[in-house]
Image (cartoon, rainbow, N blue to C red):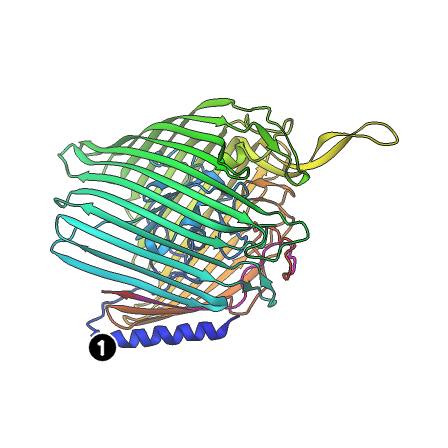
């Protein structure tokens, strides 16, 4: 742990804060300054979080870091960055990540750069989590849910400007900066933001280094036209760069470049019957390089460099209608057009084109003052083209003809849901019951990067069909709040990824004559599955200062085809947070309790990884504090993993043999971590 860097950062931040303290004005009452992720859900199956708020563990450096504080989410660790999110035991494209309504897909066939790797949470205003197949507004196949990272453009009432930013310093060389400036008139505005996050290798609780360094940055510029309070036309562009070392792989992500261009329009309060019209078109391009020599000492068999990119064009149009006082309708259409390429042969070669178009409608009907019915329906036409002429032999070298070369497939993907909600008359509570169905097409990693059980190509993998029932209760009254959410589903043709499968790889000769040579491969196959679980959250304010929050999350899955536990399911997890807050400062603690996981299916899982075996439980304690110096400056600090425990998440990836680093069964989490964050607003 590089304590000298940490304390130098502390000193710099404190001096900066002292310089601004003379501008102190009246301070309003405040909630605890550090978010611990145990808050109760806001609405049925929906939670909204402040993307800029400091959180424990150490303030998030990417999207996965941010979401791991939300009950129901788990993260598969690979290093310091690039973690994979799992929501209710489901991963990959079962949970969509949208940045201001746009999709971003990574380029690496080995998932070094999942969508969350291109997220800088401090650059957004809020994050909304929608659980289950209980909306059709945000694309097809989201059986686990949708995560919306969103910015809120604001119209300037007068000619004005604003500046806000943050500095974060922490153990292991953690060093983050964010800055955002806005300026405008009632008719026009301009906005620019910059975010950078950097860290050295961290150490686990035993003091062993983990190959985990990273350095990422993001620059965004936007300009908008706001001729009135109900109209917005915004053009924005983003440029991101980065690199990340991974302890699970024989290679690192030495280039994580992301380019974005977006145009969006929104008009509200158009007439008594039309509440809103919005449209958006966006271009996102990821350019990724992985190698085994820039961020590590190469092994005896140097693997060299591989470059890949993923281009995605997306568009969406939506109209919100209010044809009657008790009826609200949203209708629209969207599309995605993706192309994935590699640059291994000295020129760009396309290996897959995947896209689709969809139409959708969602209604909310008030049956009475306390009862409402929400329902939605969408249909998507999905298409994919396998552009590979040959398939690489992987570690064995060589290549073979692709049995599905230039084949194209098209599928119709229906989806829909209906949910009944009732506000209980005798309590500040809402109860709900919903059923949803969604059909998900295989994503690039399931369709292109693996073999099938019978051929070299998994291009004919069937679509995944999920039927799920969601029910729960949200309650808020006085000092007490409670949310209960439960689900049960059945998945036909669940898309399973299985590693270490023995398959014939060719003929070999010998003294006994010709024989079949075998090799182990990773395949994509369909099985039938089911799972159930849910989340429980509760909060109680003892008085105006003391607040207790608690949460519990559990999921249990079964592979019905193989009569095995469904792989890559996180264990039972509970969190307990106690905070004391005043209008100026707050102190608190967070305890995280994770049970052992003995329900496993070794070598089975999803595109983010496969089960490695049983895992032990663990308990982690953390402390935090916050001080609002004035209306402009706030300091927050924390100690994560206070007792320096050595532990790993059950779903994390296995450790690779890397020179200078010990090999562990799973990538261990960081040991004791100190951090300090300063937020500035003017």
Instruction: Write the residue at 88% across / 29% down.
Output: 512
Instruction: Write the residue at 58% across / 50% down.
Output: 251
Instruction: Write the residue at 34% across / 75% down.
Output: 14
Number of residues whose C-alpha sits closer than 10 Å to that of mark 1, classed few (under 14), some (14–19) or many (20 or more): few
Looking at the picture, does residue 228 appear above or below residue 452?
A: below
605 or 6, nearer to the observer: 6
Taking the view exactly as shown, the residue that stands out farthest to the right is 511
Tag 1 residue: 22
Residue 50 visible somewhere in the drawing: no
In the rendered structure, the answer to whether residue 114 lies left or right of residue 125 reads right
* Residue 675, x across and y down, in percent: 43, 68
* Residue 574, x across and y down, in percent: 49, 56
**Magenta region's main secondary structure?**
loop
Residue 375 visible somewhere in the drawing: yes
In the rendered structure, the answer to whether residue 355 lies left or right of residue 164 reads right
Instruction: Write the residue at 53% across / 58% down.
Output: 212
In the rendered structure, the answer to whether residue 103 lies left or right of residue 621 reads left
Give the magenta part as a residue range.
662-679
């Amino acid at each position: 742990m590089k304590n000298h860097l940490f304390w130098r950062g502390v000193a710099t931040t404190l001096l900066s804060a002292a310089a601004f303290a003379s501008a102190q004005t009246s301070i309003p009452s405040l909630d605890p300054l550090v978010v611990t992720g145990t808050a109760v859900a806001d609405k049925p199956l929906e939670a909204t979080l402040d993307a800029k708020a400091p959180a424990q563990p150490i303030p998030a450096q990417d999207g996965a870091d941010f979401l791991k504080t939300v009950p129901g989410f788990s993260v598969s660790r690979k290093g310091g960055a690039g973690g994979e999110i799992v929501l209710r035991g489901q991963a990959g494209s079962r949970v969509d990540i949208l940045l201001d309504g746009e999709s971003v897909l990574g380029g690496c066939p080995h998932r070094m750069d999942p969508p969350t790797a291109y997220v800088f949470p401090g650059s957004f205003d809020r994050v909304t989590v929608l659980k289950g197949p209980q909306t059709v507004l945000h694309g097809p196949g989201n059986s686990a849910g949708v995560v919306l990272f969103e910015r809120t453009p604001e119209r300037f009432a007068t000619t004005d400007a604003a500046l806000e930013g943050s500095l974060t310093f922490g153990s292991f060389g953690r060093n983050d900066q964010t800055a955002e400036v806005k300026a405008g008139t009632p008719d026009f505005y301009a906005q620019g933001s910059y975010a950078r996050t950097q860290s050295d290798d961290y150490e686990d609780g035993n003091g062993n280094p983990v190959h985990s360094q990273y350095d990422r940055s993001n620059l965004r510029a936007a300009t908008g036209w706001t001729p009135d309070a109900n109209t917005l036309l915004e053009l924005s562009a983003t440029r991101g760069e980065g690199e990340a070392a991974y302890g699970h792989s024989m290679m690192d992500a030495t280039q994580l470049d992301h380019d974005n261009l977006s145009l969006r329009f929104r008009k509200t309060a158009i007439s008594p019957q039309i509440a809103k019209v919005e449209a958006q078109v966006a271009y996102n391009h990821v350019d990724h390089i992985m190698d085994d020599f820039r961020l590590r000492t190469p092994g005896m068999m140097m693997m060299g460099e591989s470059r890949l990119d993923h281009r995605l064009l997306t568009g969406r149009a939506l109209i919100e209608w209010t044809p009657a006082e008790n009826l609200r309708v949203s209708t629209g259409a969207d599309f995605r057009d993706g192309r994935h390429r590699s640059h291994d042969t000295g020129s760009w070669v396309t290996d897959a084109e995947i896209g689709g178009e969809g139409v959708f409608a969602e209604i909310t009907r008030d049956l009475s003052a306390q009862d409402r019915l929400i329902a939605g329906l969408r249909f998507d036409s999905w298409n994919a083209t396998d552009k590979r002429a040959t398939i690489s032999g992987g570690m064995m070298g060589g290549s073979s003809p692709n049995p599905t070369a230039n084949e194209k497939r098209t599928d119709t993907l229906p989806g829909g849901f209906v949910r009944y909600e009732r506000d209980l008359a005798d309590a500040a509570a809402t109860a709900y019951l919903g059923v949803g169905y969604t059909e998900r097409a295989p994503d690039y990693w399931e369709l292109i990067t693996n073999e099938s059980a019978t051929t070299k190509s998994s291009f004919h993998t069937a679509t995944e069909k999920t039927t799920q029932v969601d029910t729960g209760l949200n309650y808020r009254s006085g000092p007490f709040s409670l949310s209960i959410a439960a689900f049960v589903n059945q998945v036909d043709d669940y898309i399973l990824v299985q590693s270490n499968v023995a398959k014939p790889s060719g003929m070999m000769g010998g003294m006994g004559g010709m024989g079949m040579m075998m090799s182990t491969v990773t395949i994509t196959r369909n099985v039938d599955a089911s799972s159930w679980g849910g989340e429980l959250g509760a909060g109680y304010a003892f008085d105006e200062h003391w607040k207790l929050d608690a949460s519990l999350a559990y999921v249990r899955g079964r592979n019905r085809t193989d009569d095995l536990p469904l792989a890559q399911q996180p264990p039972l997890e509970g969190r307990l947070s106690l905070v004391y807050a005043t209008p100026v400062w707050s102190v608190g603690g967070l305890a995280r309790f994770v049970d052992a996981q003995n329900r496993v299916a070794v070598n089975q899982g999803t595109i983010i990884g496969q089960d490695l075996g049983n895992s032990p439980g663990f308990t982690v304690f953390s402390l935090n504090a916050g001080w609002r110096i004035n209306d402009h400056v706030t300091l927050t600090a924390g100690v994560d993993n206070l007792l320096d425990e050595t532990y790993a998440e059950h779903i994390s990836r296995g450790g690779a043999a890397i020179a200078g680093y010990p090999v562990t069964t799973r990538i261990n989490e960081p040991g004791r971590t100190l951090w300090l964050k300063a937020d500035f607003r003017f």
